[in-house]
Image (tube, coloured by chain):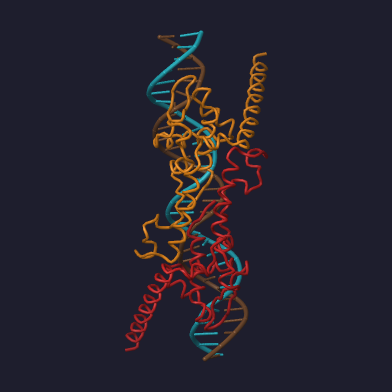
Chain colours: A orange, B red, C cyan, D brown
DNA sequence: TAATAGTTGAGTAAAATGCTGGGTTATTGC
DNA sequence: GCAATAACCCAGCATTTTACTCAACTATTA
């Protein structure tokens, strides 16, 4: 079992999509800036999210990604699973052949833990997260910073022209 | 956050200790055979368990390891922590400086998950596991197999003498 | 004094992670 | 039509971790 940057980034990016859903398709470049995630790495993650039909893409200028389903229909567990980070705590992936084809002494413990984690994460949807005040606050800060950096870039561009 | 063979082995070994506590100190060689864990790897894990005072060692022939405290006083969370597998799901280890010194958008989610996991694992003691029927059954099978392999070895030894 | 078993440290193949870079393809607005 | 945009795809790669081995040393007991 592991939860690393990969799974966290995937959830972060999906949540960013959900939070900016009303402004049309969201480009990976925007997510990259707002969430501080490498663009190329995002592309890899979205290839997997697309394969699991969690997002739909729109090509060309003004394009980007949309959630394939309603935010209330997508659980955090689904997103983490999609980027192939197994939240299964057992060694044998639940098969029970952990020790020479037989069950190992801690199998049931890890199985219980897996159930616990999966239950927790599959009960939380993106819509739940979008509704949270603490998350809305962070989102607002990120949007302001984004707008500010965008202004700076324009200044830099005009500086180059002069 | 991660739970790999390292943490699982540590719990497995500690549980083996708890299950064979009445037969005096348990050698790592025995645990190695019964649980199918490399002896040298066990040595490294027990160095950490010893540093956290979860086990006490007895040197010399007939020696081995004992639990430093009663099995009812040792939680699974303590054991996993001891071999430095952090069960913390946040990127910033709870500090809240995940994104450029500020909090990231998914911080609270992973914090909640961490609490969930920690709560679950720290509520389970080695004594709880020892009492479980399913675990007792696996333990019995392992002990029988151990006795059988021990007999085989003796036969091999006497064969060499002849 | 030999056997046992803990203690310590160095090294290592394999895998995963997080990331970079270079290219291609589809779509849009001018 | 033609750039600009942004999704797509692929190959590589430094770093870290994992799980493990080997080798030596030390304390204890029969």
Q: In this rendering, is residue B155 above or below A45?
A: below
Residue B75 shown left or right of residue A64 in the figure: right
Q: In this rendering, is residue B123 above or below A73?
A: below
- In the rendered image, residue C20, in percent from the top left (x then y), is placed at 54, 35
Q: Residue A90: which quarter of the image?
A: bottom left
Q: Which residue is drawn at 63% across and 31% down?
A: A142
- In the rendered image, residue B69, in percent from the top left (x then y), is placed at 60, 73
Along the line of sight, which residue is nearer the eye, A43 or A145? A145
Q: Quadrant of the C terminus of chain B?
A: bottom left
Q: Residue B33: which quarter of the image?
A: bottom left
Q: In this rendering, is residue A136 above or below B143?
A: above
Figure disc tally: 0
Q: Residue at x 32, y 85 (%)?
A: B159
- In the rendered image, residue B160, in percent from the top left (x then y), is placed at 34, 85
Q: Which residue is drawn at 36% across and 65% down?
A: A102
Residue B88 shown left or right of residue B23 in the figure: right
Q: In this rendering, is residue B98 above or below B26?
A: above
């Amino acid at each position: 079992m592991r939860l690393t940057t990969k799974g966290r980034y995937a959830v972060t990016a999906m949540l960013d999509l959900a939070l900016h859903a009303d402004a049309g398709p969201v480009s990976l470049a925007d997510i990259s800036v707002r969430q501080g995630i490498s663009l190329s790495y995002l592309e890899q993650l979205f290839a997997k999210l697309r394969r699991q039909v969690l997002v739909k893409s729109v090509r060309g200028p003004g394009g980007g990604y949309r959630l394939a389903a309603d935010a209330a229909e997508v659980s955090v567990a689904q997103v983490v699973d999609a980027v192939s980070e197994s939240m299964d705590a057992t060694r044998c992936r639940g098969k029970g052949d952990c020790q020479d084809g037989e069950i190992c002494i801690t199998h049931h413990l890890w199985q219980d833990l897996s159930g616990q984690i999966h239950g927790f994460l599959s009960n939380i949807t993106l819509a739940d997260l979008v509704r949270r005040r603490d998350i809305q606050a962070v989102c607002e800060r990120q949007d302001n910073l984004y707008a500010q950096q965008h202004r700076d870039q324009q200044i830099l561009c005009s500086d180059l022209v002069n």
